[in-house]
Image (cartoon, helix red, strand yellow):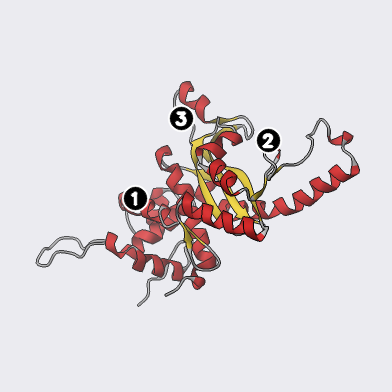
Amino acid sequence: MAYCPRSSLPAHVLAWLARRLAHLHPARPPGQGGTPPLALEVRLDAVGSVLLDGLSYRRAGRVVGISKTEVGDSLDLLLGPLAALGFCQPDGSFITTLAELGCWLAEMARAGEAVLVDGLATRVQRPREWGNQKVLYDAKRHTHTAQGVAVSTIHGDLLWVDGGWPGSCHEQELITLAGLEGALDRVEVASLLDRGFRGMARVREHWHAPVGDRRTKDQLTDPQRAFNRLQAGLRALVEQTIAHLANAWALRRWRGLLYRARDVFRAAGALICLGRWLHRVPT
C-alpha cells in the first residue's frame, strides 16, 4: 500500500524521492531485534512538513507520527541530498552545478532569450549578541534575514536558487557570492535585474536594469517610462517564481540552525521544481 503523505509534499514526488534516495536507508541487519527503523517515506514526509509547511520539529513530528528527535535526524540525513538534487527543468533534466547552468544560459543566449535575476530573503531567529545581530540585520526589510538569489526564465521556470548569506549583504554581493556574475558574463545572456543592480548593469551591455529611481522618476522621458513598464512586466514573472518559493514556509521564516539555511534554499527549490516537472523526468 502506497504511503499517504501528511505534508504538502505531493505523493508522486515523495514516491520518486523514496526510490531515488533509497541508498540512504540501509537494510536492517538480519537476526537483530529492537525497534524497526523509520521508513524513508516517513522521513521524507517529516522533512516536507518542515520545509514546505514551515512546522517546527515538534509539530512536524505530531503530524507525521514520530518524535521531534526523529524529525531532526531525518533533516540531518536528507537535507543535504535533497539540496544536491538540482532543479528540474521542463525537458526532465536537472541543473545541479554552475557549469550546467552556464550551458543552459549559453543555449538561451544563442536563442535570443533572456533570464531574470532577483534577490530573496527569509526571516531567521534573532541571535543573542549584538555582534551577531548586526551581521544578520537586513536594513531593507527591517528584520534579521538570510539572503538568497534566484534565476528564472521569462516563462517563470526556475533555473537556479542559492542562498544562506547574512542579511547585511548587499544584493550586488549576492551575485558574486553565488558565482552568477561569471556565469552570466561568460555567455553574455540578456539579464533583467532590478534597481539594486544598476551599478553592475551600467558597465555591462547585456545586463538591463530600470532607468531612474524614486528621486528622479518625475524626470524620465516617455521612452524611458515605456522601457521601465516593459521591463516591469517581464520582471513580474521572476516575482511569480519567487512567490512559488515563498510558498515553502521555511523560506518565509526559517526556525532552524543558520548553517543549514543554504541547504534549505536549495532543497525547497528542488522540491518545488520536482512538483512541477516530475512528469517530464524519464522513467
Residue 52 visible in the picture: no
**Which quarter of the rendered picture does the N terminus lie within?**
bottom left
Q: Which mark is residue 203?
A: 2
- Most extreme residue toward the right is 222
First in sequence, mark 3 or 1: give its number.
1
Assess disc 2: are there few (<14), some (14-19) or many (≥20) residues with their C-alpha within 10 Å of its C-alpha.
few
Q: Secondary structure at mark 2?
A: loop
Residue 193 visible in the picture: yes
CA distance for labels 2 and 3: 38 Å
Check disc 3 and report the residue beneath it: 127
Q: Which mark is residue 68?
A: 1
x and y percentages locating residue 89 in the rendered image: 53, 63
Q: Amino acid at mark 1?
A: Lys
Q: Secondary structure at mark 1?
A: helix
Q: Secondary structure at mark 3?
A: loop
Of tags 2 and 1, the one toward the viewer is: 2
**Disc 2, disc 1: CB below 8 Å?**
no
